[in-house]
């Protein structure tokens, strides 16, 4: 089983209007909403790839209920901890020429509620995959990811971490199967400017020396690179279509990589499917769909 964890899920409410003027009532041209959070995004794309997953994390109030009901399907089992206080956050994204985002803080999480989530990790078995994605809410301890990884370290669990800076670095002692920094994050971790392909490989290998097995680096418009646990370097480009939306592209890449490796145990194929899923999300208003993934696989 694949488990995803989203500690602070959201409803992303997107409003589009030709112009935003402060101090008056503005009328939208259109609006839409998506259920968000990096782990949830991974589960949703895995479902499009015909893989089952269990979505773990926290939800609260009527928005939390909407998130849980909205993502549950034949491929996604939801097993969230329902918080006693607050509501799951609503993030507002205003698209009026340039984009303005208002991201909510999210509900308060009590220590006993974190304990309840930790107990759910005990159901994870050897051979399962655990995906930790995103930031840690400010009401949780900074070492929450470490506590989770410690909980499963005696089992042969395939760990995936998609996080930034200290969250990522502090997870490396648990020897994650996959991490996914981008080039900017590599620069921040090592306090250098990573520009060239040579530098990208060099610092990916340093992350492997610290414990990572496979390092998947998102290169934005240049595609992606994988330095795998055998030492091999694989590259993938990008397809040329109009980019509509980049939100969730990285999460889609993680889902595609995990699915590709799960199906074929091949790092080149995992990188290919991950790249296709990331591209598919970029070319759609929401996350990658099965039809779009299959269309792009023929071109990649």
Image (spheres, rainbow, N blue to C red):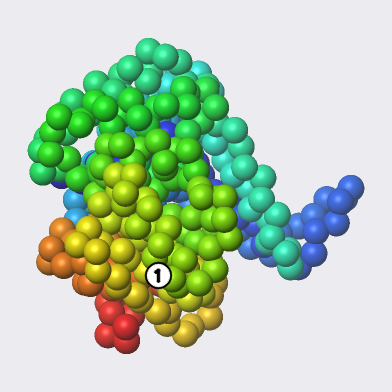
Q: Residues within 10 Å of mark 1 (few under 14, many from 20)?
A: many
Which residue corresponds to the image point at 40% horizontal and 79% vertical from the top-left? 237
Viewer-nearest residue: 274 or 108: 274
Q: Is residue 284 visible?
A: no
Q: Quadrant of residue 130?
A: top left
Q: Residue furthest top?
A: 112
Viewer-nearest residue: 226 or 105: 226
**Left or right: where does residue 92 sit relative to residue 294?**
right
Whole-percent x, y for residue 29 in the image: 69, 64
Which residue corresponds to the image point at 55% horizontal and 31% vertical from the top-left? 106
Q: Disc 1 on helix, strand or loop? A: strand
Tally of numbered discs: 1
Compared to residue 293, the image places residue 146 above or below, namely above
Which residue corresponds to the image point at 33% horizontal and 17% vertical from the top-left? 115
Whole-percent x, y for residue 294 in the image: 27, 77
Compared to residue 219, the image places residue 214 above or below, namely above
In what quadrant of the picture does the C terminus appear?
bottom left
Which residue corresponds to the image point at 34% horizontal and 44% vertical from the top-left? 210
Compared to residue 140, the image places residue 284 above or below, namely below
Q: Residue furthest right?
A: 23
Q: Is residue 298 visible?
A: yes
Whole-percent x, y for residue 43 in the image: 31, 50
Check disc 1 and report the residue beneath it.
224
Whole-percent x, y for residue 230 in the image: 19, 62
Compared to residue 123, the image places residue 299 above or below, namely below
Q: Quadrant of residue 51?
A: bottom left
Viewer-nearest residue: 177 or 117: 177
In what quadrant of the picture does the N terminus appear?
top left
């Amino acid at each position: 089983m694949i488990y995803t964890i989203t500690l602070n899920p959201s409803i992303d409410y997107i409003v589009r209007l030709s112009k935003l003027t402060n101090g008056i009532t503005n009328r939208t041209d259109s609006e839409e909403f998506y259920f968000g959070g990096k782990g949830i995004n991974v589960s949703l794309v895995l479902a499009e790839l015909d893989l089952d997953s269990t979505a773990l994390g926290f939800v609260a109030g009527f928005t939390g209920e909407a998130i849980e009901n909205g993502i549950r399907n034949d491929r996604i089992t939801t097993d969230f901890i329902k918080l006693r206080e607050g509501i799951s956050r609503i993030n507002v994204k205003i698209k009026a020429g340039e984009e303005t985002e208002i991201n909510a803080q999210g509900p308060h999480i009590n220590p006993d509620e974190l304990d309840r989530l930790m107990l759910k990790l005990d159901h994870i078995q050897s051979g399962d995959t655990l995906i930790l994605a995103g930031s840690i809410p400010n009401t949780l301890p900074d070492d929450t990811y470490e506590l989770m990884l410690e909980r499963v370290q005696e089992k042969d669990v395939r760990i995936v971490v998609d996080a930034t800076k200290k969250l990522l670095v502090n997870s490396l002692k648990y020897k994650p199967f996959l991490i996914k920094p981008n080039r900017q994050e590599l620069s921040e971790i090592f306090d250098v400017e990573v520009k060239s392909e040579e530098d990208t490989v060099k610092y990916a290998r340093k992350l492997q020396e610290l414990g990572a097995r496979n390092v998947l680096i998102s290169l934005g418009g240049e595609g992606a690179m994988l330095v795998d646990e055998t030492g091999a370097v694989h590259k993938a480009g990008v397809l040329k279509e109009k980019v509509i939306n980049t939100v969730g592209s990285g999460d889609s890449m993680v889902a595609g990589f995990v699915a590709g490796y799960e199906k074929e145990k091949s790092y080149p194929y995992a990188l290919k499917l991950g790249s296709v899923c990331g591209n598919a999300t970029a070319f759609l208003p929401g996350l990658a769909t099965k039809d779009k993934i299959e269309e792009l696989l023929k071109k990649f």
